[in-house]
Image (cartoon, grey):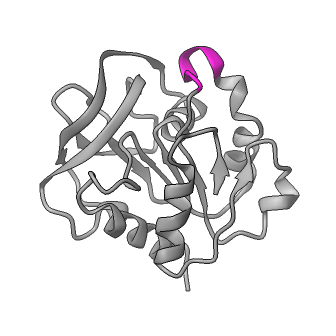
């Protein structure tokens, strides 16, 4: 787990540990060598504005470029992933805070087994404005078009919402799906 300074990084870690995953938190300045033996990586949420402060995400671009493992970006981690793969990330037209209805357009491996609609917890000022080439749009909300996206062939998954908090329905299932992608 890569810590991008998010208030809920330890919650992400705890959910993964509760699902029996061996997991440790590393800062985003960690070298590639420090994380290259992982079976999967979670890019946590965080306070930096990707629109203005993407430099605060340390070595995240190296992880995306060099690691051939499943990577899940959450909130700012998802936004950085979107920007890295060629999308525009900008201040949200309507920032989302609190409970939001998520509508699934495409059931994908990361959203496998989830209903067509569920509630999730949001806390973001910035948003991914367009789906990067190679990614599929998986879910949207009324005010944020890209709530979830994936590039299965590249093993990249992104969620604008926070699956780690108890206010998000099916968050544990999303993490369980991610762990299945990471292998035994």
Count up the numbered dots: 0
Q: Residue 140 at what x, y percent from top left?
A: 23, 38
Q: Residue at x 56, y 77 (%)?
A: 21
Residue 77, above or below 108: above
Residue 154 in view: no
Q: Residue at x 25, y 47 (%)?
A: 120
The answer to whether residue 32 is left or right of residue 100 is right
The quarter of the picture where residue 48 lies is: top right
Residue 51, above or below 170: above
The answer to whether residue 136 is left or right of residue 118 is right
Q: Residue 98 at what x, y percent from top left?
A: 26, 35
Q: Residue 88 at what x, y percent from top left?
A: 48, 21
The quarter of the rendered structure image containing the N terminus is bottom right
Residue 22, above or below 136: below
Residue 160 in view: yes
Q: Residue at x 71, y 39 (%)?
A: 61
Q: Residue 60 at what x, y percent from top left?
A: 70, 41
Instruction: Tell me which secondary structure the magenta stretch mostly adopts.
Output: helix
Question: Which residues, given as a range, are shown in magenta?
Answer: 48-53
Query: Which is more toward the observer, 141 or 10?
Result: 10
The quarter of the rendered structure image containing the C terminus is bottom right
Residue farthest to the left? 116
Q: Residue at x 63, y 77 (%)?
A: 22
Q: Does the segment drawn in magenta span residue 51?
A: yes
Query: Which is more toward the observer, 65 or 114?
Result: 114
């Amino acid at each position: 787990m890569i810590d991008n300074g998010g208030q809920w990084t330890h919650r992400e870690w705890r959910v993964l540990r509760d699902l029996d995953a061996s997991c440790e938190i590393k800062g985003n300045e960690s070298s590639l060598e420090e994380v290259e033996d992982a079976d999967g990586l979670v890019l946590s949420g965080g306070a930096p504005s990707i629109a203005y402060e993407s430099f605060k995400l340390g070595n995240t671009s190296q992880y995306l470029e060099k690691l051939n493992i499943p990577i899940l970006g959450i909130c700012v981690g998802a936004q950085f992933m979107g920007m890295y793969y060629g999308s525009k990330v900008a201040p949200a037209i309507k920032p989302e805070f609190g409970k939001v209805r998520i509508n699934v357009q495409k059931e994908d491996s990361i959203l496998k087994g989830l209903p067509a609609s569920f509630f999730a917890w949001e806390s973001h000022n910035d948003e991914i404005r367009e789906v990067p080439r190679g990614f599929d749009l998986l879910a949207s909300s009324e005010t944020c078009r890209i709530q979830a996206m994936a590039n299965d062939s590249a093993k990249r998954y992104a969620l604008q919402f926070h699956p780690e908090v108890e206010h998000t329905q099916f968050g544990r299932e999303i993490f369980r799906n991610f762990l299945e992608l990471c292998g035994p």
